Amino acid sequence: MIIQRVPTGISKFDEMIEGGFPENSMILLVGYPGAGKTTFSAQFIYNGATRHRAKGVYVCFAETKETFLKNMMRFGWDFERLEKDGRVAILDLSVTRESGLQKNLDTIMETMTSLNASRLVIDSFSAISMGLKEPIDIRVMIHLLYRFLKKAKCISILIIDQPWGSTSLDEGISEFLADGIIHFETYFDENEILRRKFRILKMRGTNHTKTPHEYDITSNGFIILDRKGYEKDFREKEYSTRRGFTDLLDVKGVGVKRSNILKALGIRTAEDLAEADPKFLADNLKISRKVASRIIRNARKIASGR
């Protein structure tokens, strides 16, 4: 049985997880302060809305909606415009006691349903758990949240804030319920320069990368850095020829030049291109909407096997 994948649109990352997150999975994003958890998650929602016609909901518990929108504009990500267009929703919810948790979950579910969203980010799970006093309350909330996310039938990212120096997740959900766990680290090298690396600790049903990878947060968002010894299993050529994926060059109207541009944008296969937004394609390839729509139709024919 072939597992359906949902691409993040983040260059190089999808290659490390066989093309994207497994469909309908719950991903834990764990990391120290300043590691880029919010940036990665927002990029996942933004890429879905602008490249893959996938609507998303971003739930702010740790910061206000106003702060989130302002911070994202530093990367050129206009979430306010996307929200006005009905492609995303940004929820500003307060941290409450257990009695108010169900109300917040209802608000999220109603928004997911009305928007027909397929991507969800909760930022952060740690902020929610702060409103609970006893460990038993946290465990009850964990199972309530898990059932809620499975009912939503979406890709969900739960951000977990890890205290400096801590080596455990401390939330009690990783081993049993999460479909995937990604750990972001920050550290200082021998020259006292701040560096970042991530490890994929778990990704259910996926032959994922097993080594740590350096990354940075730039004006373009989350960027995986090149390095020698990059795993052979995830090289570009092998990725494009994996079973179930079709090379962009097989799509009529693409060509080598356009293929290189699309790959730089995180659209690496005909299947990715089939879900692209015509306006996004037209703007980045410098072509008309009509031509962009025709290329996408050609990609859909290949993706559907026609």
Image (tube, grey):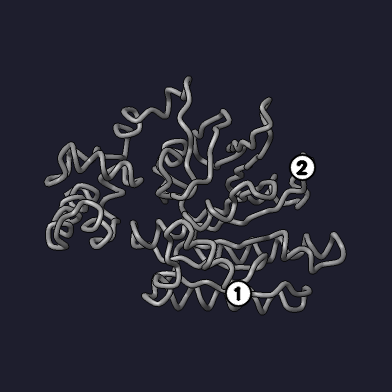
Across and down, in percent, residue 184 comes to 62, 42
Residue 175: image location, x then y, percent: 70, 44
Residue at position x 51%, y 58% from top?
42
Q: Which amino acid does label 2 sit on?
A: Ser
Locate the N terminus and report the quarter of the image it occupies.
Answer: top left
Secondary structure beneath dot 1 equals strand
Query: From the viewer's perspective, is 187 left or right of 220?
Result: right
Which class describes the residues within 10 Å of circle 2: few (<14), some (14-19), or many (20+)?
Answer: few
Which of the 4 image quarters holds residue 61? bottom right
Q: Is residue 27 above or below residue 247?
A: below
Per the model, the C-alpha gap separating discs 1 and 2 is 28 Å
Identify the residue shown where x is 20% and y is 55%.
296
- The label shown at residue 92 is 1
Regarding residue 53, the answer to whether it shows in the image is yes
Vertical position of residue 36 compared to residue 226: above or below: below
Seen from this angle, which residue lies furthest right? 134
Query: Is 71 placed left or right of 127 in the picture?
Result: left
Q: Which residue in the protein does label 2 denote?
A: 168
Would you place residue 258 above or below residue 67 in this image?
A: above
